[in-house]
Amino acid sequence: MLHKTVCKSAALAVASALLVVPNAFADATDIGPAQFEAVVQEAYDKYKGLREGKNADYIPILTTVPSDLFGVAIATRDGKIYSAGDVDYKFSIQSVSKPFTAALIMQQQGPEAVRKKIGVEPTGLPFNSKIALELYPERSVNPMVNAGAIAAVSLVKADSEKQRWQEILQNLDDFAGADLNVMQEVYDSEYKAAWSNRGIANLLYNYERLYGDPEETLRVYTKQCSVGVTAKELAVMGATLANGGVNPLTGKRVLDSSHVPELLAIMAVAGFYDESGEWMFNAGLPSKTGVGGGIVSVVPGKFAIAAFSPRLNEAGNSIRAMRAIRHIAGELGVGLYGSNRE
Ligand code: GLU
C-alpha cells in the first residue's frame, strides 16, 4: 500500500516536472498598442513585395481576385484593432469558416458530438482528399478538412435548408460582430465546379457519416465558403476565440469558454491541412487557412492575427499571409510552446 503511494507520488512529481504550461511565454509578454502597431506594419512592409504562389483556380472566380492584395490585422481581446494594407477588402472566407461551424456544433451538441460524429485526427492529406475518407474509419476525420466540414454542416440542427443556412450565417455574424453576406458570384462559380465536394458528400452519405441530404448539404456548405469577410473581420472572429468565446466588440458569448480549448486543439492539428505540423513547428499557433487567401491565428487569452493575400502555395495556404503571421508571432514571442522566431 505504502509502496503504491510512494510510486504514485513519484510519478506525479515526474509528471509535474515534465508539464509544459502552454502560453507561458505569451503570459510573460506585456504587449502595448505601439508594439502591436509597429509589428503589423513591419510584417506588411516585409512581405508586400513577395510574389510567390498563385491564386486558387479550381474555383474559377478566384483567379479574378487581384493577386497583389495584402492585408494584415490584429484584434485584441479588449476589442482593439491594429492593421496594415488591404484590410477592408471583402474576400471569400472559404475554409476559414470551418472552425466556426465546428464551434456551432460544439455549442449546440457539445464537443463530444464533433469527436464522435466527425473526428479530431489530422489527415496528413490535402484538404479535399477522398483517399482520407477511404483510409480512416472516421471517414470525415476532422472538421477542418472538406469532408469533416461538409459533415459539420449536415450536423447543424435545423428543420429546413433555409434554417440550416440561417443558423450557420448567424453564427459567423456573431463571431465577426458584423453582418456578413454571401458573395453570390463566388457561390455560383464554386457550386458549378463542386464535383469534388459532391463526391465527398456522397461518399460520406454512403458511409453513414453525413447527417442530411448530400445535395442540400453541399449547397449550404458552398454558401458558407462563399461568405465575404475582410481581414479585420477575420481578426475579430479569431479574437472571439482568444477571448474565451465572447466577441470583444459586441460582448456576446458565442461559444462556451469550456469548449474553446477543444476547438483550438483541432485547429492546431489540422488547420493547415497537410502542412499543419510545419506550421506548428514554425509559428506554434492554432490557425485556420482558406483558399480565398485568408488565415486566422489565435493567441489564446490574448489576441488574434489575421492576414489575407490570394497567392497560395501547393497545399492551398496563402504565402504572404503565412509569412506575415509567422513574423508577428515570432517577434511578439507568442508561440504556444515558446518563442519561434523567423
Ligand atoms: N470551398 C473550398 C472547397 O470546398 C474550401 C477549401 C479551402 O478553403 O481550403 O474546396
Image (spheres, helix red, strand yellow):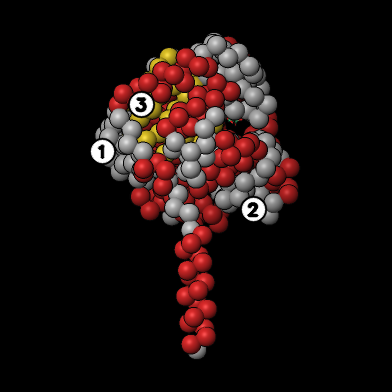
User: Residue 133 at what x, y percent from top left?
Assistant: 69, 46
SS category of the residue bearing label 2: loop
Residue 166 visible in this rendered orientation of the protein: no
Q: Is mark 3 within 8 Å of ligand 1?
A: no
Q: Is mark 2 within 8 Å of ligand 1?
A: no
Q: Nearer the viewer, mark 3 or mark 2?
A: 3
Q: How many callouts does the rendering have?
A: 3
Q: CA distance from mark 3 to mark 1?
A: 22 Å
Please tell me in which quarter of the rendered image ligand 1 is found: top right
Q: Residue at x 37, y 35 (%)?
A: 303
Which one is in front, 187 or 280?
A: 280
- Where is residue 39 drawn, in percent x and y? 41, 23
Element type where label 3 sits in the image: helix
Q: Measured along the vertical axis of the image, is residue 291 above or below residue 276?
A: above
Which one is in front in this view, the residue at disc 2 or the one at disc 1?
A: 1
On screen, residue 186 versus residue 135, left or right, reads: left
Where residue 238 sits, quadrant-wise, is top left
**Secondary structure state at the residue bearing disc 1:** loop
What distance separates the C-alpha of mark 2 from that of mark 1?
36 Å
Of marks 3 and 1, which one's residue comes earlier in the chain? 3
Residue 338, position as x, y percentages in the image: 48, 42
> In this orientation, which residue lies closer to the viewer: 101 or 21?
21
Residue where numbered disc 2 is placed: 138
Name the amino acid type tagged 2. Glu
Rate crowding at label 2 as few (under 14), some (14 to 19) or many (20 or more) other CA atoms within 10 Å: many
Q: Kindly give the residue lying farthest to the left in the view shown.
A: 251
Label of residue 36 in the image: 3
User: In the displayed structure, would residue 297 be above or below residue 38?
Assistant: below
Q: Residue at x 44, y 36 (%)?
A: 333
The quarter of the picture where the C terminus appears is top right
Amino acid type shown at disc 3: Phe
Check residue 251 in the rendering and tell me which mark sits there, or answer none.
1
